[in-house]
Image: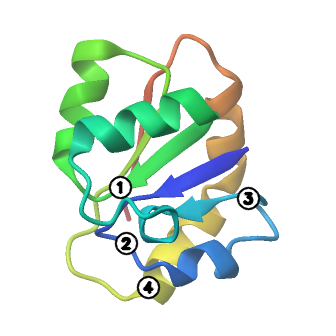
Amino acid sequence: MKLLFDQNLSSSLVRRLADLFPGSVHVGGLGLAEADDDTVWRYARDNGYVIASKDSDFQQRSVLLGSPPKVIWIRIGNCTTSEIEQLVRRHSVSIHTFEQDESQSMLVLSR
């Protein structure tokens, strides 16, 4: 399972979570740092990524369009990158299960 980390998340999450989500990337590493949501959405869909974002725009897009791509909406407000890493690690089994469940298009992670 590959995650595509949105611009509102640290690019260091790619390295920090590589043991659980190999092949993940950050939009900045793809030259998509300034891309609009539609471009990021299409890239994720066309390349088999699950979008991880703190942006409610992807949540809304997921509700309207379904998947692919799937969306992980990280809802914990202002926090450190370490807190996000720990949240994703705590929910890693749920994330992998979510990715396999064809009936779900969005997963919300919160404290």
How far apart are the alpha carbons under marks 4 and 3?
Answer: 16 Å
Residue at 40%, 31% (x, y): give it. Answer: 42
Sequence order check: which comes first, mark 3 or mark 2?
A: 2
- Residue receiving disc 3: 21
Where residue 66 sits in the image (x, y, percent)?
37, 15
Does the residue at mark 1 contact the one at mark 2 (Cβ under 8 Å)?
Answer: yes
How far apart are the alpha carbons under marks 1 and 2?
Answer: 7 Å
- Check the image and report above or below for 110 versus 98: below
- Residue receiving disc 4: 81
- Check the image and report above or below for 11 versus 27: below
How far apart are the alpha carbons under marks 2 and 4?
Answer: 8 Å
Please state which amino acid type lies under the numbered disc 2.
Leu
Residue at 24%, 63% (x, y): give it. Answer: 34
Where residue 51 sits in the image (x, y, percent)?
46, 45
Which numbered mark, 2 or 4, is in the foreground of this view? 2
- At mark 2, the secondary structure is loop
Give the class, few, some or many, for how many residues have Cα within 10 Å of label 2's Cα (few <14, many ≥20): some
Q: In which quarter of the image is the C terminus?
A: bottom left
Please state which amino acid type lies under the numbered disc 4.
Thr
State the mark number for residue 9.
2
